[in-house]
Amino acid sequence: MANVKLEKITRRFNNSTAIADITFEVPDGEFWVLVGPSGCGKSTILRTIAGLETATSGNLYIGDTLVNDIPPRQRDVAMVFQNYALYPHMTVAENLAFGLQMRKFDRKAMRERVEKVARSLDIFHLLDRKPKQLSGGQQQRVALGRAIAREPKVFLLDEPLSNLDAQLRDDTRAELKQLHQRVGITTIYVTHDQVEAMTLADKIVVLNRGKIQQVGEPQTVYARPANRTIATFLGSPPMNILSATYAGDSFKLGEQFLACPAIIREKLQLREGQSLDMGIRAENIRVGDIKENDRYPLFVEIKVIEPLGRETLIRGILAESGVHISFYAAPELSLRAGDRIPIQLDLDRLFVFDPATGDTLY
Ligand code: ATP
């Protein structure tokens, strides 16, 4: 077992920089998730840790050892990819034993290890089958098992669930979490799926364009995103972003007004006419009631209604402004596309971003 430390890791390909100055340290036994949009450099970081990619500059430590020049095989890391290539001519048991055979394990120890791993992943009954006799989810569990059987110091997973269908993906995700709780191997996991990031991680590292945007516990990053990109990346539907102008103690949204909370006004020292991006998550908006003592209710024209069972997701457009906005409504409300309704924003849950830089101002 080991911690993994990256110190100013940069990787350039020809003239373009895939990752720049990446610095973070995963403590021994923790589960960290690298998350970010396509092309942000997640796989490059993982491949550099595995030794499949060489950093242009920077230092990489596994445990106390500087591994910059140590070849992949000697790093004692196991990597599982999205297209988990199993050996098609071998049985599940032989696939699981493969890494152990290479290390000259004796037969008895090998069999015990394989059976233990197979039990923990619920594939014991499949040990004699060949990969083509397995479902996609079972194959993926064998691929995970093959990596676990080696008991590596570090476990690297690159979008390991992305080939599975939705139900299997949910199940395997939960299994992975339990497995980590049992085995406790230091794990670095790459995904662009924010649900996986939120549910699996001890800490998440949010990346964008090759740079670290924020590192923190999922709940913290969700509640206090450092900028608009992170705010809209974490959470589904994405956080609503509403362009506004500050006018007479209010936010002007198109032709509508929303009272600016005093705390925001004081903290940001807003100027008349200043442009702002306001952010609010769908769960912090509800269908309003014009009778309430609300100075300026906002009106929305409903475009799409998506019943989700426990609640209904409404996608609409802020009246007279054309800005898209999503929010939840109780399923028993009878709403229809085309309706014009008032909404109420939870002003304690407002974010304010700098429209030019995207930085979180409040
Ligand atoms: P995805 O989620 O789509 O897999 P990613 O976040 O894993 O993306 P990387 O695969 O790490 O992103 O790629 C980061 C950047 O580096 C991209 O712009 C990519 O085009 C570039 N890149 C990666 N590998 C190479 C290579 N071998 N040669 C040139 N450019 C590369």
Image (cartoon, grey):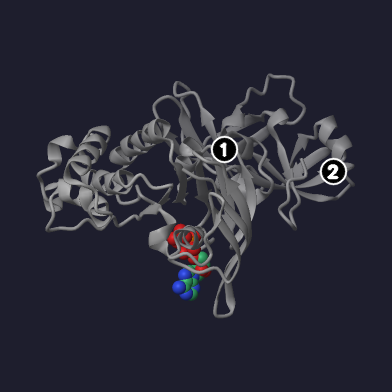
Depicted 69 relative to depicted 304: above or below: below
Point out residue 272 in the picture as x, y percentages from the top left corner. Answer: 89, 47
How far apart are the alpha carbons under marks 2 and 1? 35 Å
Q: Is residue 189 visible?
A: yes
Residue in view at x 61 percent, y 43 percent: 240
In the rendered image, residue 346, in percent from the top left (x then y), is placed at: 67, 28
Image position, residue 56 (x, y; %): 58, 72
- Mark 2: amino acid: Ala
Q: In screen coordinates, is 96 left or right of 244?
A: left
Q: Is residue 130 left or right of residue 318?
A: left
Q: Nearer the viewer, residue 81 or 182?
A: 182
Is residue 69 shown left or right of residue 346? left
Residue occupied by mark 1: 218
Closer to the camera: disc 2 or disc 1? 1
Q: Secondary structure at mark 1?
A: helix
Q: Amino acid at mark 1?
A: Pro
- Discs 2, 1 touching: Cβ within 8 Å: no
**Could you classify mark 2 by the number of other residues whose Cα lies within 10 Å: few (under 14), some (14-19), or many (20 or more)?**
some
> Could you say which is closer to the camera, residue 139 or residue 321?
139
Residue 111 falls left or right of residue 247 = left
- Identify the residue at horizontal 25%, vertical 57% (top origin): 102
Marked residue nearer the N-terminal end (2 or 1):
1
Quarter of the image that includes the C terminus = top right
Q: Secondary structure at mark 2?
A: strand
